[in-house]
Image: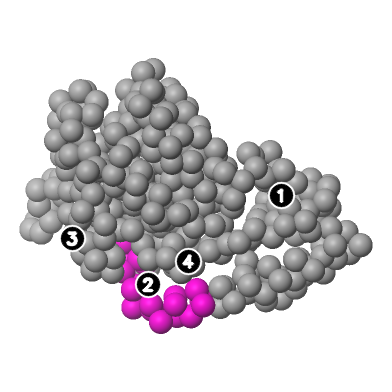
Amino acid sequence: MSITPDKLDEMVRPNIQALAPYRSARDDFETGLLLDANENSYGSPFPEASGLNRYPHPIPKELRTRIAKWRDVEPEQVFTGVGSDEAIDLLIRIYCEPGKGSILTTPPTYGMYNVSAKIHNITVHEIPLTASFQVQTEAILEKARTERPSILFLCSPNNPTGNDLDRTQILKLIELFPGLVVVDEAYIDFSKQESMAPMVRQYPNLVVLQTFSKSFGLAGIRLGLAFAAPNVINWMLKVKSPYNINTLTARMALKAFDHMEMIRFHIAELRKERERVANALGKLVAVETVFPSQANFLLFRIRDAEQVWKTLTEQGIIIRYRGNEPGCTNCLRATIGLPDENDRLIRALQSITS
């Protein structure tokens, strides 16, 4: 049985438990003669910005409800943030005492878990993934018993490797880890696996992160999501900035739901291109391994990876060098582009390595 909601509440930092959150004007009133928030009563300076002189509601209710329906959860199980990075930062601030607390990560993985922890003076314990980029469940649980980290961060599909983590092992960790288990699903829509978001109904210590930056193609609006039990979401709402989701972000996100057919089409096309590029990379003599991917990118091991990366950069082809991460010696990571962009990358690699 996973950790109980009451136990999780006890893990919240005492100063956060005692915090009286800031209450903004729009928490109290949304309509009427609004002379309470020191907004500019003359309005926006140009027609395209009409209405933007007013602060948004601190919690975008319509967007929250639409997201909840999409992921089969309740609105009170949804947090909207400035990218998933805000949710990562808030969870560490809420559950980890600076100078005392710790988190656990499984490198190679998304770097912001580590960065956010270091910003808050939180210790980072690491249990590297296996050679096939899967979690070492027993080692994680043993580290949890000895070090008592408050949060375990898992990324599935994993960045930078692209593979799904074993769902059975994730569930075992949710059941047995003595704290929050955060599953970062930034790339889940490119995977064959279903999102774990609905499972927050069952597991009070599960937090699922997602984003509009990948499958929705809206990285520029900086909208991230967290799905969790209502008590976890309430702590996040208590600590977040008053107006973290701006009016334009909420507007664009809601509009995206009117274009789900196009979003699904783009996902399907990127999946097809992912397989085509993987096959093409696998035929290059210099490429030693193309790792299986369920994301919108490919990790591959290639001879002289750093020099190949530098040469590509000089040609204006920008991919990521990942050779300095555990298990990723001589590895590069390439986002799946449009077909002609992918062709240009393959041709350049053929020329450089021939």
- CA–CA distance in space, label 4 to label 2: 20 Å
Q: Which residue is mark 4?
A: 191
Foreground mark, 4 or 3, reads 4
**Label 1: how many residues lie within 10 Å, few (<14), some (14-19) or many (20+)?**
many
Q: Does the CB distance between marks 2 and 3 fall below 8 Å?
A: no
Q: Where does label 3 land, which residue? A: 74
Residue 119 in the image: x percent, y percent? 45, 28
Q: Give the number of the disc on residue 331.
A: 1
Please check the rendered image and state whether residue 262 is part of the magenta-colored stretch, yes or no. Answer: yes
Q: Which residue is mark 2?
A: 256
Height in image: 326 above or below 280? above
Residue at 48% in and 66% down: 191
Q: Secondary structure at mark 2?
A: helix
User: Marks 4 and 2: CB-CB under 8 Å?
Assistant: no
Task: State the image coordinates of residue 145 (x, y, percent, origin top left).
Answer: 35, 27
- Name the chief secondary structure element in magenta: helix
Query: Would you say 306 lies left or right of 54 here?
Result: right
Q: In the rendered structure, which amino acid carries the disc numbered 4? A: Ser
Of labels 2 and 3, earlier in sequence is 3
Would residue 15 be found to the left or right of residue 313 on screen? Answer: left
What's the distance in space between the residues labelled 2 and 3, CA to CA?
20 Å
Residue drawn at point x = 85 percent, y = 62 percent: 285
327 and 122: which is toward the camera: 327
Q: Where on the picture, by quarter, is residue 253?
A: bottom left
Sequence-first disc among 4 and 2: 4
Give the Cα distance between marks 4 and 3: 24 Å
Q: Which range of residues does the magenta coloring cover?
A: 250-268
Rendering coords of residue 80 (x, y %): 30, 53
Can see residue 69?
yes
Closer to the chain start, of discs 1 and 4, is 4
Q: Nearer the viewer, mark 2 or mark 3?
A: 3
